[in-house]
Amino acid sequence: MASEQSVTTKPAQELIETSGHETVYVDEYVDGVLDPEKPMLGPVRDGGHIVSNTAPGCWGPMITPSIRGGHEVTKPVFVNGAEVGDAIAIRIKEITITSLATSSGNDQWMDDRFQGDPYVAGRCPKCDVVWPETCLDGIGQDSVRCVECGEDVTPFKFTNGYTIYFDNNREVGVTLNEKSARAIGANAAHFSSLPENSVQNPILTFCPSDLVGVVARLRPFMGQLGTTPAIAMPDSHNAGDFGTFLVGAPHAYGIEADDLQHRTDGHMDIDAVRAGSILICPVKVPGGGVYLGDMHALQGDGEIAGHTCDVSGTVNLQVHVLKGMSIDGPILLPVEEDLPYLARPLTQKEQETANAVASEWSLDGLEQSAPISVIGTGPDLNAATENGLARASNLLDMTVPEVMNRATITGAIEIGRHPGVVQVTFKAPTEKLEEIGLMSLVRDQYGTDL
């Protein structure tokens, strides 16, 4: 009879230290600034999950001057094994809206209530205090008040705004009249489903109602998702367009133009960053520092009003470390439905037709290719496009004119956010994708027959 063998297992804490947690639950938020010098949550293991309850982005933080970045994103999570010069692939497993309603619209800046940048350095025009603590006094656009002196201190107000209520299944939203908007505004935190640790003033308090009876389809996505920049940056400015506001700025977070290279473009507002997609992000600090926030219930390309329907919600992500994949900015593998028509994988019939043409003209064979979407950002759409083209050129070791041709005949340039976020989407040779280590993810996303 064989003797029993003893099995030695490592203590749970030792396993966490060497490989990381299987799942990291996040319900803490930064004060608006992504700072690589501050402690991160986690660690999460390579292949593990990050689950979070996110707070609304834009408008709530924008009317809360004590939040220093224009958004209220989660504290970054350290991913075990992620080193500077690597990349982290983030699979978006699930996005669920929890808010019952939200308010949004086009904004105007209140010129006497900020120091150089209304998103970053709100100030009280009476106390002259930057980042004043506030309280709510009633409802309406004059309800955000300085705790010290009672002055109206919101740096933003609406030029045209709306309050939108969602059905129980979060499939559609309907914009409400003034009476209904005010009824919701009186209980704004409840209808916003604000997470317990959120400190923002809920934008529903403003009760806008310029659009009434408009019906909109919902399709949630993450306006902010990415990795921590290499220098401290206000969260909404971790991008090539908003980031330019920091250059030479008079507040504490002003930077030099060369410092923009440290951004990771986590603030994209690309509606294809939704459940089922895969986002590949650069690692510019040890552990990567994965953070998220600014969930949008819906958005048209360009987010031309400047803002859309910011909501609370729950998110489930899975992270994978890609060793040695040194990239400057994000790469997106959208769900197939979101690909431009020209970038979608060929059907069997299309492939057979192409093979026949190749045979007719005595070609040795056809290029095997697959879709990829490279994110570009800059102070305007032209600069963002040039940035995306250059990133794609560097990634795949091909000339910019070749990328331009491929994006023209097998893809598209799509606007994520006006003024300066684009997707350069095209079919890339699978041979190149294999060389840089992306092909396994591409096959996961678009099929094993690629």
Image (spheres, grey):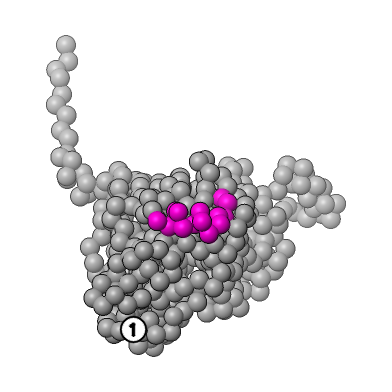
Residue 166 part of the magenta-drawn span: no
The residue to which callout 1 is attached is: 125
> Between residues 334 and 142, which one lies in front from this camera angle?
142
The amino acid type found where label 1 is placed reads: Pro
Q: Is residue 190 left or right of residue 223?
A: left
**Residue lying at the far front of the rendered structure:** 179
Q: Residue at x 38, y 53 (%)?
A: 187
Quarter placement of the N terminus: top left
Counting labels gives 1
Residue 442 horizontal/vertical position (percent): 54, 50
Q: What segment is highlighted magenta in the picture? A: 173-186
Q: Residue at x 43, y 47 (%)?
A: 98
Q: Residues within 10 Å of mark 1 (few under 14, many from 20)?
A: some
**Residue lying at the far right of the rendered structure:** 360
Asked if residue 34 shows in the view, the reply is no
Quarter-of-image position of residue 64: bottom left
> Between residues 198 and 396, which one lies in front from this camera angle?
198
> Between residues 167 and 266, which one lies in front from this camera angle?
167
Residue 178 part of the magenta-drawn span: yes
Q: Residue at x 66, y 57 (%)?
A: 340
Asked if residue 5 shows in the view, the reply is yes
Residue 264 higher or lower than 346, as above or below: below
Quarter-of-image position of residue 333: bottom right
Residue 136 horizontal/vertical position (percent): 33, 65
Q: Is residue 36 left or right of residue 433?
A: left
Residue 237 horizontal/vertical position (percent): 42, 73
